[in-house]
Structures are given as C-alpha cells and as structure tokens.
Amino acid sequence: MSAYRGEAVEPQRERLNAAMTESRLDLRLRWTEVAKRAGIDSSTLRRIRYGEGAISDLAARGLEDALEWPHGTIAALLGGEPLADPGLDDDRAFKDARQSVQETVAKWAKDYGAGLTIELIDEATATLRAGLIASSRERPHGRDTG
C-alpha cells in the first residue's frame, strides 16, 4: 500500500511536502501549475509529495526551479539539513536580483517600446541567473535556526 493511500510517510518526505506547500502558497500557484513549471506530470508530483518512490535528479531540479529554490534544496530537505525557510520568498539576494531584472525590463520596455526583443529579455534573465548563482555560492543551502 502506498503512503498516499494511508501508509505512514517518511518524516523527510513530510518535511519536503510541507516546504513545497508553503512555497507554492507564497507563489500563489496551484499544484497543476507547479507540475507544469517543473516539467513533470501532476501524478508524478503527487507521488513525490506523498513519498511514493524515488525523486529523479531531473524532477528535483525542475521542482526547485518551479518553486524558486536554490538547486540542492530538495537534497538538503531530504537529508535533514536545518533550513530556516527553503523557499526564496524571504531571501534578500533573490528579491534584490528579481527587482533589478524587473526594473531593467521595465526601463527597456519604456526606452525601446516595440523594439523590446527576446534577446533583451534573455539578457535580463542571464543577469538574474548570474546574481543567483553568485549568491548561492556565497551562502550554504541550509541555515541553522537554533
């Protein structure tokens, strides 16, 4: 019998499901939207949430991207590492980088009007990605809260 149908779920998977739920709500997404963003089926997401089977590296990476988590967060959660908040909603570096990209794209839209191209948006995305990579190298995935 699967955990989804009544069997106990491992504490690490319960922790992962709780963190995913919190981040999903912070991002104001439905589970179907999380699955779509992650590039996985809703049934796969359900199995991951309820502890049924292993989580592939590809599914983990997709979920981390969908929930705006640093890569490695799922492994940290499943490994029992202490995390203050696995979501990035309160992460200052992420908010600053996202705001910077939004301001840049808004400025370009005003300056270039109809000339705003996918290349300019890609440039803004690359700026955000570089900022996130740099900030994730500067801090560990987990933070001890106690």
Image (cartoon, rainbow, N blue to C red):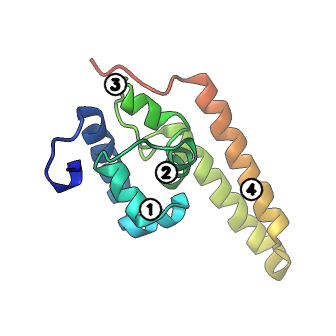
Crowdedness near tag 4: few (<14), some (14–19) or many (≥20) residues, C-alpha within 10 Å: many
Say whether marks 1 and 4 touch (CB < 8 Å).
Answer: no
Identify the element where label 2 is drawn. helix
The image quadrant of residue 124 is: bottom right
Residue that numbered label 1 is attached to:
34
Identify the element where label 1 is drawn. helix
- State which tag comes first along the sequence, 3 or 4: 3
Residue 5 in percent (x, y) is at 18, 56
Residue at point 81% right, 73% down?
A: 116
Q: Of the numbered discs in the image, which one, if any, rests on residue 124?
A: 4
Q: Of the numbered discs in the image, which one, if any, rests on residue 80?
A: 3
Residue that numbered label 2 is attached to:
63
**Dot in front, 1 or 4:** 1
Q: Quadrant of the C terminus?
A: top left
The image quadrant of residue 85 is: top left
Residue at point 50% right, 44% down?
A: 60
Crowdedness near tag 1: few (<14), some (14–19) or many (≥20) residues, C-alpha within 10 Å: many
| Residue closest to the eye, 50 or 83 | 50
Identify the element where label 3 is drawn. loop
- Seen in the picture, residue 142 relative to 24 is either above or below; the reply is above
Amino acid, disc 3: Gly
Crowdedness near tag 3: few (<14), some (14–19) or many (≥20) residues, C-alpha within 10 Å: some
- State which tag comes first along the sequence, 3 or 2: 2
